Amino acid sequence: MRVSPMMKYVQLENVGMTFSTRNGMFPALSGINLAVERGEFVSIIGHSGCGKSTLLNLVAGLLETGEGVLLCAGREISGPGPDRAMVFQNHSLLPWLTCLGNVYLAVERVFGDREGKAQLKERARAALALVHLSDAVDKHPHEISGGMKQRVGIARALSMQPKVLLLDEPFGALDALTRAHLQDELMRIVAETGSTVMMVTHDVDEAVLLSDRIVMMTNGPAATIGEIVRVELPRPRDRLKLADAPAYVEYRRQVLEFLYQKQMRPAA
Amino acid sequence: MNSPVIATAMLDVPQPSVGETPVKPAQEITIVAKAEATAGKAVIRPIAARLNPRLRPRLTPRLHGALLQMLLPLLGLAAFIGVWSLIAQASPNLPGPARTWDSAMELFSRPFYRNGPNDQGIGWNILNSLQRVGVGFGLAALTGIPLGFLIGRFKWLNDMTAPIVSLLRPVSPLAWLPIGLLVFKAANPAAIWVIFVSSIWPMIINTAVGVRQVPQDYLNVAKVLSLSEWKVFTRILFPAVLPFMLTGVRLSIGTAWLVIVAAEMLTGGVGIGFWVWDEWNNLNVEHIIIAIFVVGIVGLLLEQTLMLIARRFEYR
């Protein structure tokens, strides 16, 4: 089912990140070692402020660090690039462009030098069709719901045919029903496209339902990977059937135990 | 946001369809009542739909509100004219509304005459002033807006220019007139120079603030897509800054129009400001009052036009 597995598609070796703040140097991350396979869905979970978004931003190239090595498809990550598409928590659509325009901007960047305008438009339309938004192509972001905006964000990311799809708490700002619906959609899309995904989340159910592996981060400062759970639930996964499946409950328990016993959140 | 739709819906209600004789609401209600009593539900439905009882009562307060909204400004205007004529009666040198009105009628019957360089119609004076404002303002926009973009985008440039901007901005634009006269050695470019200086600051400052307030999310999108600097400018920076920029433009045109009258009083030539001064020398006070209204109305029109343009570019 998975396309030509490459053992270390995204590779982090001894990665650390230190921010210089007003109160001196703050080590946010240290000693991160992680290899993501091609076609794998990896979630990164941890308490707020543990640096999971920082980790994702490092892979995206939005942040740079001198500590450790970051590789994507065998090449060193130096700065952001369309091969690592990011979906932001707050959708980050440009309000003056239509849904199609927003996706087109990405498509044009990646395929603009090879393809004509009609072909690029077709690509953008296809990406919106993939997230079931064919009816909203000409709408502006303020005319559609939060869930739809996030779909456009996903369509924009997928339209670039990225090597890795990076999701930064993609459904965090949505209500529970919309979130569940979009999680199902994401599972379908990932299965259809065979995407490699790294997703930051703080929703335990989301992590267990979607992931092949769940990376659990210790609390900062100098946060690192505490444990990794391999979720071996068969796909396609059905949230209703899984709800009381013993395996699902056990994975859920493992993550919760890590978060609430081993990494008890310091009194907030 | 739905108000236009509601408005048309409500306008539709009281108008009877073609070929139908208008019926007064009271009559119609009795018809409905009778119909209900005799013929049953099947008959009342269409009449009730035409009457649309849910919308009808809302029309009256709305109409009432619209009338009130028209009435109050008119009332204010009337009060203003009343106070004006009272003051005019007390001091005989000040012409009252009636005398000013007569004089205005005469003046505007021939707006475009030319009797030599110092005696031209009011139309020419207004157009000349507008032209000066247009040129000075246009030059200010051409330099101020790009400068604002650069200052907003590069922090070092902002730090470099901040003291100059904050030092020069509060200076009355007229203080720049002697410098203009000295450099350009002519009155007309000096007046344009004053307009330029007075209208450049709001455009620089608003554009720079706009650039600085472009949400980081949008810039992150640009980074993740690694868009070219040109695409970042045309697709993200420019549309995001446009509303700020237009606010700057609107403030600028207000100031420019404010300043032109004073500048022209000092420089002379053909223009509304000089005309005011000339009429003062002729002791033609009616014309001065007319000029005040003309300046006000033209300023209002300039601002309203720009507001209209700005609204066109609102994206939320």
Image: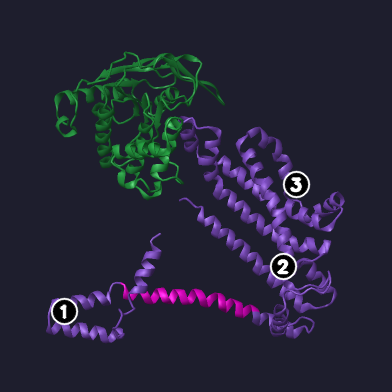
Residue B241 horizontal/vertical position (percent): 55, 45
**In the structure shown, which secondary structural element does the residue marked by tag 3 occupy?**
helix
> Crowding near pointer 1: few (<14 within 10 Å), some, many (20+)?
few
Chain that is green in the image:
A
**In the structure shown, which secondary structural element does the residue marked by tag 2 occupy?**
helix
Q: Nearer the viewer, mark 2 or mark 1?
A: 2
The amino acid type, in three-letter code, at marker 3 is Leu
Residue A247 horizontal/vertical position (percent): 16, 23
Residue A145 horizontal/vertical position (percent): 34, 47
Q: Chain of mark 1?
A: B
Q: Are marks 1 and 3 on the same chain?
A: yes
In magenta, the rendered stretch is B55-80
* Residue A149 placement, left or right of B199: left
Residue B154 horizontal/vertical position (percent): 63, 34
> Crowding near pointer 2: few (<14 within 10 Å), some, many (20+)?
many
Identify the mark at residue B126; answer none if there is no mark: 2
> Residue, x 73% and y 86% (percent of image)?
B89
Q: Nearer the viewer, mark 2 or mark 3?
A: 2
The amino acid type, in three-letter code, at marker 1 is Val
The magenta stretch spans residue A122: no
Identify the mark at residue B168; answer none if there is no mark: 3
- Residue where numbered disc 1 is placed: B43
Q: Chain of mark 2?
A: B
Label 2 to label 1: alpha-carbon separation: 66 Å
Front in this rendered view, residue B193 or A176: B193
Lower position in the chain sequence, tag 2 or tag 3: 2
